[in-house]
């Protein structure tokens, strides 16, 4: 069990502990999702360097996860030393996002990071983004 500082400067933040909802973190240094990079070996390597607490996976397609696609499962590969872990989900169907998040919760994932679109990003299909227009049932393009 890691030591937690008793220091708290309000709003759940201190230089040593931080809260996101019920998730208590020992560092304010996060690993952002980097598609193609933030796989399990990369995360474990950075955790060994030290200072890092919450790390995030590559972005993972919610539907692929629900369909148990091996590539999606590879992206969420983890181990006990790889905690706390957030999985970044993307998709355009709210129910699939919900079901995938519940599946991840049942697997012990600490948090789900919803990817709502990277304007101009390469490799992220426009139809795969949850956008304002998706939610209002319009043209499916980012709002
Ligand atoms: C190669 C690369 C891949 C990235 N992939 C993702 C991604 O999958 N999801 C995401 O939300 N952001 C992605 N980002 C954005 C980063 O997570 C981060 O927000 C951005 O690099 C800004 O970080 P900085 O403020 O520390 O410079 C990516 C950035 C890079 C450079």
Image: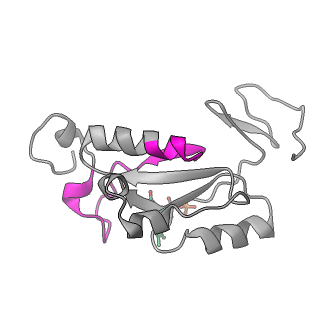
Residue positioned most to the left? 139
Asked if the stretch drawn in magenta spans residue 105, the answer is yes
Q: Residue at the spot x=45%, y=69% of the render?
A: 35
Q: Residue at the spot x=19%, y=56% of the render?
A: 127
- Asked where in the image residue 18 lies, by quadrant, the reply is top right
Q: Which segment did they paint magenta?
A: 103-129
Q: How many marks?
A: 0
Please state the horizontal and vertical placement of residue 89, each as a whole percent of the image: 41, 52
**Nearer to the camera, 113 or 71:** 71
Q: Is residue 109 left or right of residue 125?
A: right
Please state the horizontal and vertical placement of residue 61, each as a whole percent of the image: 34, 57
Please state the horizontal and vertical placement of residue 34, each as a whole percent of the image: 50, 67
Above or below for 59 versus 112: below
Q: Is residue 55 left or right of residue 33?
A: right
Please state the horizontal and vertical placement of residue 55, each as a whole percent of the image: 62, 57
Q: Residue at the spot x=27%, y=46% of the render?
A: 130
| Chosen colour scheme | one colour
Q: Residue at the spot x=71%, y=73% of the render?
A: 45
**Nearer to the camera, 49 or 101:** 101
Viewport quadrant of the C terminus: top left
**Nearer to the camera, 124 or 100:** 100
Asked if the stretch drawn in magenta spans residue 121, the answer is yes
Q: Is residue 120 left or right of residue 53?
A: left
Above or below for 25 versus 58: above
- Asked where in the image residue 59 lies, by quadrant, the reply is bottom left
- Asked where in the image residue 3 lies, by quadrant, the reply is top right
Residue positioned most to the top? 10
């Amino acid at each position: 069990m890691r030591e937690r500082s008793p220091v708290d400067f309000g709003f759940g933040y201190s230089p040593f502990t931080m809260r996101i909802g019920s998730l208590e973190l020992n560092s304010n240094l996060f690993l952002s999702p980097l598609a193609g990079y933030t796989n399990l070996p990369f995360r474990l390597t950075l955790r060994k360097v030290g200072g890092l607490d919450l790390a995030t996976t590559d972005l993972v397609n919610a539907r692929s996860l629900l369909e148990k696609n091996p590539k999606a499962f590879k992206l969420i590969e983890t181990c006990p030393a790889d905690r706390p872990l957030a999985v970044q989900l993307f998709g355009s169907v709210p129910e699939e996002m919900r079901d995938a998040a519940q599946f991840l919760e049942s697997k012990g994932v600490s948090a789900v990071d919803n990817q709502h679109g990277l304007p101009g990003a390469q490799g992220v299909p426009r139809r795969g983004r949850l956008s304002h227009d998706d939610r209002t049932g319009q043209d499916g393009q980012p709002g």
